[in-house]
Image (cartoon, grey):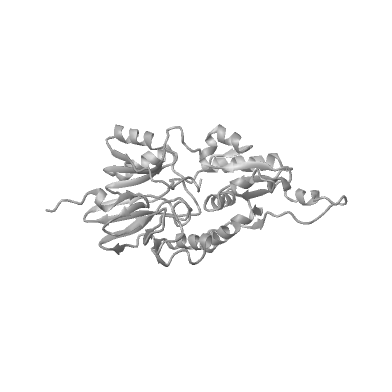
């Protein structure tokens, strides 16, 4: 019986990103390549300029919305569970629970299975398919929040805090900083699930992706543009227009919540939704009054639980805080190694 192929012969790190030599493709390459398998639409994983891109239909639609229809020479859509053979290597996608269309890339050849998870979370998210545990020989994981201190609170409790603040300060406009892809739509949908049925006002940078989510069946309820009207009061100021937004919720890019754009609204109350809001220094640096610990990445417990559940012989860590996760793996008898891939960040966080 022939020995199984070495894991590094199936997938290995290169300057372009993870590369599969027998299949001749890269996963989430950071530079243009001939054949790219893309796990999700955030810009640090999905870049324009590749010849062929294989991804879920939703991710391809996101890339087209962000980069234009000519972001790649050829698109190869693959639904969750669909198996495609590339030069004798089988590739399929399993849900990652990160954002709409996000996927784990499942790579198989000669009895070896490696799962590249991309970015993922285990919390319920009404805007995307939930994470699916795929048993494997090697599990490739992120480590954005790979420290034991990072245990995210219940997401619904954080939304309840936002709604309680809106009720407590009806004269103020709550401006919620949330990334345009994934986080913004998740916040809006969670507000709807909590019973908030008033219009949510969105920054212009959110419109295209909110429309895309709606086209893919995610009901976001009534949305209106967060623009100040030209109404003037008797003294010629825009105070009347500002009062129109008192007691309202505005969703905007994180960079906008302290920008002069935000000061046009009624006594703006800056809010930021991110797993990093657990760190007080980051809260102060961003001038946030209401920090919401809502993350689209797995926390420490979710990372370690996932590694246990997939039952991998080895864990490869792409980026993030790998030291603590490697120590935990060693204590649990799991071989782990850092890949320290360059070019990935927490764009979606």
Query: x and y percent of residue 180 in the render?
Result: 56, 52
Query: x and y percent of residue 220 in the render?
Result: 58, 56
- Residue 241 is left or right of residue 59, and the answer is right
Residue 212 appears in view: yes
Quarter of the figure with residue 332: top left
Q: Is residue 218 above or below residue 271?
A: below
Residue situated furthest left in the rendering: 1
- Residue 215 is left or right of residue 343, and the answer is right
Residue 217 appears in view: no
- Residue 256 is left or right of residue 303, and the answer is right
Identify which residue is drawn at 15% across, 51% down.
3
Query: x and y percent of residue 279 in the render?
Result: 53, 34
Identify which residue is drawn at 53% across, 53% down.
181
Identify which residue is drawn at 27% across, 47% down.
137
Q: Nearer the viewer, residue 284 or 78?
A: 284
- Residue 212 is left or right of residue 114, and the answer is right
Q: How many marks?
A: 0
Residue situated furthest right in the rendering: 234
Query: x and y percent of residue 115 in the render?
Result: 33, 51
Q: Nearer the viewer, residue 266 or 222?
A: 266
């Amino acid at each position: 019986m022939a020995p199984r192929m070495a894991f590094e012969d199936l997938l290995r790190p290169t300057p372009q990103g993870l590369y599969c030599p027998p299949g001749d493709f890269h996963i989430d390459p950071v530079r243009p390549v001939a054949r790219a398998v893309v796990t999700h639409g955030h810009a640090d994983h999905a870049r324009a300029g590749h010849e062929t891109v294989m991804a879920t239909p939703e991710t391809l639609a996101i890339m087209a919305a962000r980069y234009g229809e000519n972001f790649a020479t050829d698109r190869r859509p693959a639904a969750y569970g669909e198996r495609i053979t590339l030069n004798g290597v089988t590739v399929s996608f399993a849900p990652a629970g990160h954002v709409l269309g996000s996927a784990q890339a499942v790579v198989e050849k000669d009895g070896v299975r490696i799962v590249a998870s991309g970015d993922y979370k285990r919390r319920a998210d009404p805007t995307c398919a939930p994470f699916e545990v795929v048993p494997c020989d090697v599990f490739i994981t992120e480590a954005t929040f790979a420290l034991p201190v990072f245990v995210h609170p219940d997401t619904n409790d954080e939304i309840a805090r936002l709604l309680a603040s809106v009720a407590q300060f009806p004269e103020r406009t709550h401006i919620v900083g949330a990334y345009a892809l994934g986080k913004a739509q998740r916040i809006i949908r969670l507000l709807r699930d909590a019973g908030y049925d008033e219009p949510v006002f969105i920054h212009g940078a959110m419109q295209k992706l909110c429309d895309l989510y709606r086209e893919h069946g995610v009901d976001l309820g009534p949305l209106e543009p967060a623009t100040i009207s030209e109404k003037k009061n008797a003294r010629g100021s825009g105070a009347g227009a500002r009062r129109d937004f008192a007691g309202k919720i505005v969703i905007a890019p994180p960079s906008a919540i302290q920008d002069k754009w935000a000061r046009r609204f009624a006594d703006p109350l800056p809010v930021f939704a991110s797993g990093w809001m657990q760190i007080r220094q980051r809260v102060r640096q961003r001038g946030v009054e209401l920090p919401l610990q809502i993350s689209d990445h797995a926390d420490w417990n979710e990372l370690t639980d996932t590694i246990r559940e997939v039952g991998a012989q080895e864990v490869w860590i792409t980026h993030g805080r790998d030291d603590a996760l490697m120590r935990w793996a060693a204590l649990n008898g799991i071989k782990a190694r850092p890949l320290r891939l360059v070019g990935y960040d927490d764009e979606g966080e």
